[in-house]
Image (tube, rainbow, N blue to C red):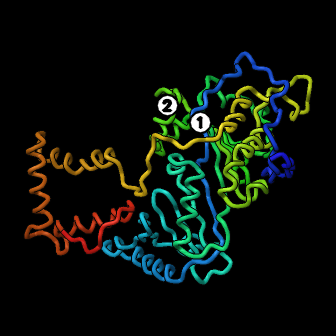
């Protein structure tokens, strides 16, 4: 690493840069303020939130024919045919989308990966463009996830080279007593022109820097975002580092597309993993930093770094680790909360309509009425209960990446 030179390219998006050889002395001269002591943040987690990898090469023609057939099944209006639109590969069972994406003919998904595959006739496209799911990255870390992906890709075709990064998102989750959204705009020294403030009912939820550029950043209230995303698996990971329910967790996140990556990270994606700490140092020292304005110096690049930012910039000096608390299945099946809360809607609605409050009575009469509705003399053709349940269960199993033997009846 000692031969790396730092050479940022000017531009609104920040351009690309060579990685610094070591942590830059950006904190020289910085003095903790009364409102922001040097220990003003508690880091909870850091690592790779999302990664996209591109593989050169061509799809296996037999695989392409099979995927085309499955894609057509997924387009059927018959949910029994839709249920068969899944691609089984080793211990992965991928849902095949009825549509491609852009110039990629096939889209396959499970809880670990989203794969976009080109058709056999496409000579200028990559074999595959793959998103590694955030939850899987959280559980096993970037190195294991990318190694697993490298082992999977040859099942679809012949890769003519290693997978390379087309986008990577790095993040730090932290708590602080400082109101980070109240700091004036001129405290931010940045290589982009644009800063957007995000609000929800007069509450500032975060800010975005350089949106749409090859490099961009977001600082936002992650606890508030969890209310929408439902990624509650993060809470035990935070709690293991001292977080308590009710505390606001902020996330500082950088998104870097391939055009903004330093040359050192444009080789094999796996080879880039050990360099992510240096990438974070570049992003938090040269692309964006929070500074303490000087009344005697108009040159903003010389302003001392804010203690909060100094702490954030150093978090990746410790390599991120996979979570020992998580195991991530390949299926996307809903959990018990979703099934046993939402699943009671029909039962409770029936009990309310019939004036029933006792569970045993309500459940018994509900099942009897359900059977009459589907199998009684007035039932519509093709609506028989056993057939209906089989058809719907298979359709949902496909969406949840759960494989059911197509010949397994009853």
Q: Earlier in the sequence, mark 2 or mark 1?
A: 1
Residue 338, compared with residue 178, is above or below; it is: below
State if disc 1 and disc 2 touch (CB < 8 Å).
no
- Going by the image, does 57 lie left or right of 398? right
**Secondary element at tag 1:** strand
* Position of residue 323 measured from the top left corner of the image (x, y, whole percent): 51, 41
**Between 297 and 199, the one nearer to me in the picture:** 297
- The answer for how far apart the CA atoms under marks 2 and 1 are is 13 Å
Write down the residue under mark 2: 240
Q: Residues within 10 Å of mark 1 (few under 14, many from 20)?
A: many
At x 32%, y 44%, the residue is 337
Specify the quadrant that holds the C terminus. Answer: bottom left
Picture disc at residue 173: 1
Left or right of 371 in this view: 113:
right
Q: Can residue 110 be seen in this snapshot?
A: yes
User: Residue 314 occupies which quadrant of the picture?
Assistant: top right
The image quarter in which residue 300 lies = top right
Query: Hey, which residue is sitting farthest front in the picture?
Result: 2
> Who's the residue at 53% across and 54% down the image?
133
Residue shown at 80%/53% (left/top)?
Answer: 16
Residue 76, given in percent of the width and then of the height, sits at: 38, 76
Q: Position of residue 245 (x, y in %)?
A: 46, 28
Identified at 72% across, 58% down, the residue is 258
Of the pair 273 and 85, the residue shown nearer to us: 273
């Amino acid at each position: 690493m000692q031969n790396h030179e730092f050479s940022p390219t000017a531009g609104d998006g920040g351009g690309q840069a060579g990685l610094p050889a070591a942590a830059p002395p950006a904190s020289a001269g910085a003095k903790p303020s009364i409102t922001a002591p040097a220990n003003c943040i508690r880091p909870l987690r850091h690592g790779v939130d999302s990664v996209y990898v591109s593989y050169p090469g061509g799809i296996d023609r037999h695989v392409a024919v099979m995927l085309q057939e499955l894609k057509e099944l997924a387009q059927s209006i018959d949910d029994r045919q839709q249920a068969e639109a899944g691609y089984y590969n080793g211990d992965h069972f991928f849902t095949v989308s009825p549509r491609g994406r852009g110039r990629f003919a096939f889209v396959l998904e499970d809880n670990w990966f989203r794969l976009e595959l080109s058709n056999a006739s496409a000579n200028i496209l990559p074999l595959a463009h793959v998103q590694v799911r955030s939850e899987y990255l959280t559980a096993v870390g970037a190195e294991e996830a990318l190694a697993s992906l490298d082992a999977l890709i040859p099942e679809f075709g012949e890769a003519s080279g290693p997978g390379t990064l087309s986008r990577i998102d790095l993040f730090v989750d932290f708590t602080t007593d400082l109101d980070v959204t109240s700091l004036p705009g001129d405290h931010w020294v940045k290589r982009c022109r644009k800063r957007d403030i995000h609000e929800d009912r007069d509450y500032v939820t975060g800010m975005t820097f350089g949106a749409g550029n090859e490099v961009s950043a977001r600082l936002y209230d992650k606890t508030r975002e969890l209310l929408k995303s439902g990624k509650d698996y993060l809470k035990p990971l935070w709690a293991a580092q001292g977080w308590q329910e009710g505390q606001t967790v902020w996330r500082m996140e950088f998104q870097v597309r391939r055009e903004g990556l330093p040359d050192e990270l444009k080789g094999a994606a796996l080879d880039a993993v050990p360099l992510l700490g240096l990438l974070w140092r570049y992003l938090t020292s040269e692309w964006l930093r929070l500074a303490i304005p000087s009344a005697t110096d108009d040159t903003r690049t010389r302003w001392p770094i804010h203690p909060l930012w100094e702490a954030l910039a150093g978090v990746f000096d410790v390599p991120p680790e996979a979570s020992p608390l998580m195991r991530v299945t390949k299926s996307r099946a809903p959990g018990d909360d979703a099934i046993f809360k939402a699943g009671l809607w029909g039962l409770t609605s029936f009990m309310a309509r019939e004036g029933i409050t006792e569970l045993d009575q309500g459940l018994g009469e509900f099942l009897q009425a359900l059977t009459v509705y589907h199998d009684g003399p007035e039932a519509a053709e093709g609506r028989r209960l056993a057939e209906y349940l089989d058809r719907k269960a298979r359709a949902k199993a496909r969406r949840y990446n759960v494989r059911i033997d197509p010949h397994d009846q009853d």
